Amino acid sequence: MLLFFTLGLLIHFVFFASIFDIYFTSPLVHGMTPQFTPLPPPARRLVLFVADGLRADALYELDENGNSRAPFIRNIIMHEGSWGISHTRVPTESRPGHVALIAGFYEDVSAVAKGWKENPVEFDSLFNESKYTWSWGSPDILPMFAKGASGDHVYTYSYDAKREDFGAQDATKLDTWVFDNVKDFFHHARNNQSLFSKINEEKIVFFLHLLGIDTNGHAHRPSSRDYKHNIKKVDDGVKEIVSMFNHFYGNDGKTTFIFTSDHGMTDWGSHGAGHPSETLTPL
């Protein structure tokens, strides 16, 4: 009887362990040889804006007066750029969303053991394959891509984690900090020959992580005046950065700008599940 009980317990343990072996192992394959295309790239540099927590409908819909909350981006949509809606996957959290955007794969399920905050395994990314990447934004997001990069070519500039207050302060300052520091960076580059040379290379990336909208959404909900006002502030900042880049590079037409979000947000200010308000993001 004891032998039968022990054998049954062992079999159930094997079945239980097999679940983790099958579903909680990394899908990534390591050791592959990087492939390169001989075709000329459409641009020399990429500017990636990620408005954390921005819902697609919040950006695209018009207000009660028939005006856009983001007139500059609206103008780009109507006359210059391509646009659409991107579909994120569960869990709609910041780390998995950014991994999908920048590394090109959906998050490793084994990352759940680390709260979706750290790299469970090493992985390649756009930043790692670039010649240089400069990034500004949240200390929760930027380090995870610099940490896995080979060599010293991914640079991060973050504000203090204490600034990420979910209600007591004006969260739009998180975004204006990013825009102001990008402008200061380019002003400094004009007087620094080494930096000036680097930012005139090809295969370079500028990443602007904008956390204000997500912070205001958690604190005040997406239907709030604060959330909608933050969208307008981001639009103003994007307009200034685009103008600065075009002026700095002499309108050479070799800069690609991408504006998107890592996830959306429910009406009550949460995210993580699979409701359309969380998975549908602007592109």
Image (cartoon, rainbow, N blue to C red):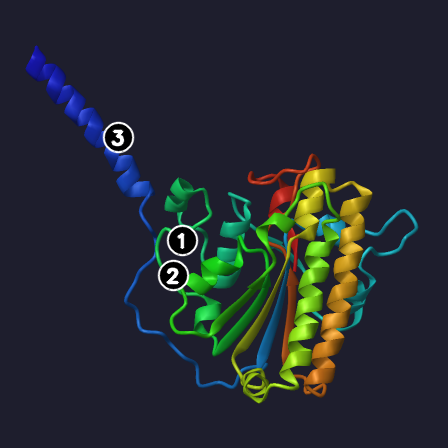
Measured Cα–Cα span from mark 3 to mark 1: 25 Å
Residue placed at 78% from the left, 58% from the top? 233
Q: Nearer the viewer, mark 3 or mark 1?
A: 1
Q: Tell me the residue at 40%/46% (across/down).
A: 111
- Above or below — where is 181 with respect to 268? below
Q: Secondary structure at mark 1?
A: loop
Mark 3 falls on what kind of element? helix
Q: Classify mark 2: helix, strand or loop.
A: loop
Spot occupied by residue 142 in the image (x, y as percentages of width and height): 52, 60
Tell me the number on the disc at residue 38: none
Q: Is residue 14 visible?
A: yes
- List x then y, in percent, for residue 261: 63, 55
- Disc 3 target residue: 16
How many neighbours does mark 3 have within 10 angstroms: few (below 14), some (14-19), or many (20 or more)?
few
Give the number of the disc on residue 123: 2
- Amino acid type of the residue tagged 1 in the rendering: Asn
Q: Nearer the viewer, residue 134 or 203?
A: 134
Local crowd size for mark 2, using a 10 Å CA cut-off: few (<14), some (14–19), many (≥20):
some
Q: CA distance from mark 1 to mark 2?
A: 8 Å
Q: Which residue is mark 1?
A: 119
Front residue of 47 and 210: 210
